[in-house]
Amino acid sequence: MFKRPPSYPRQGCSICKTLRVVVAMAVFVLVLASFSFDLGLLKGIQFTDMFATIIGVGFLVVLGWRVWIEFIRKG
């Protein structure tokens, strides 16, 4: 019941953080798919196109951010 905190400082594991984000996104996609199939709320949305758009925009954002960090801000 009364657990003692660890005597060493915990550090966040980058793999664990990434895994948590992936699992959270997977649950979110499953919830959206459930609403789409069961209730028909998202009938007009093409999930394949939406996913491709999100991945493309994310790629461009990360690429732009890295260009900003590596070349523009240092300059």
Image (cartoon, rainbow, N blue to C red):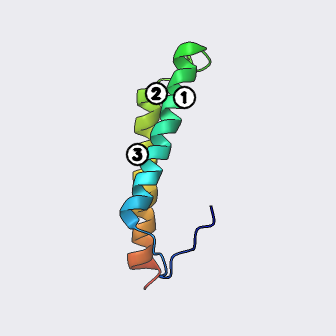
Q: Amino acid at mark 2?
A: Phe
Q: Which residue is mark 2?
A: 47
Residue farthest front in this picture: 1
Q: Is residue 55 above or below residue 60?
A: above
Identify the residue at horizontal 58%, vertical 68% (top origin): 3
Nearer to us: label 2 or label 1: 1
Q: Is residue 46 above or below residue 16?
A: above
Identify the residue at horizontal 40%, vertical 37% (top origin): 52
Quadrant for the N terminus in the image = bottom right
* Cα separation between marks 3 and 1: 20 Å
Q: Are marks 3 and 2 in contact (CB under 8 Å)?
A: no
Q: Amino acid at mark 1?
A: Leu
Q: Which residue is mark 1?
A: 32
Q: Which residue is mark 3?
A: 56
* Cα separation between marks 2 and 1: 9 Å
Question: Depth check: 58 or 72 in front?
Answer: 58
> Residue 31's spot in the image, x, y percent?
54, 30
> Residue 26's spot in the image, x, y percent?
45, 39
Q: Secondary structure at mark 1?
A: helix
Which badge, 3 or 2, comes first in the chain's sequence? 2
Q: Secondary structure at mark 3?
A: helix
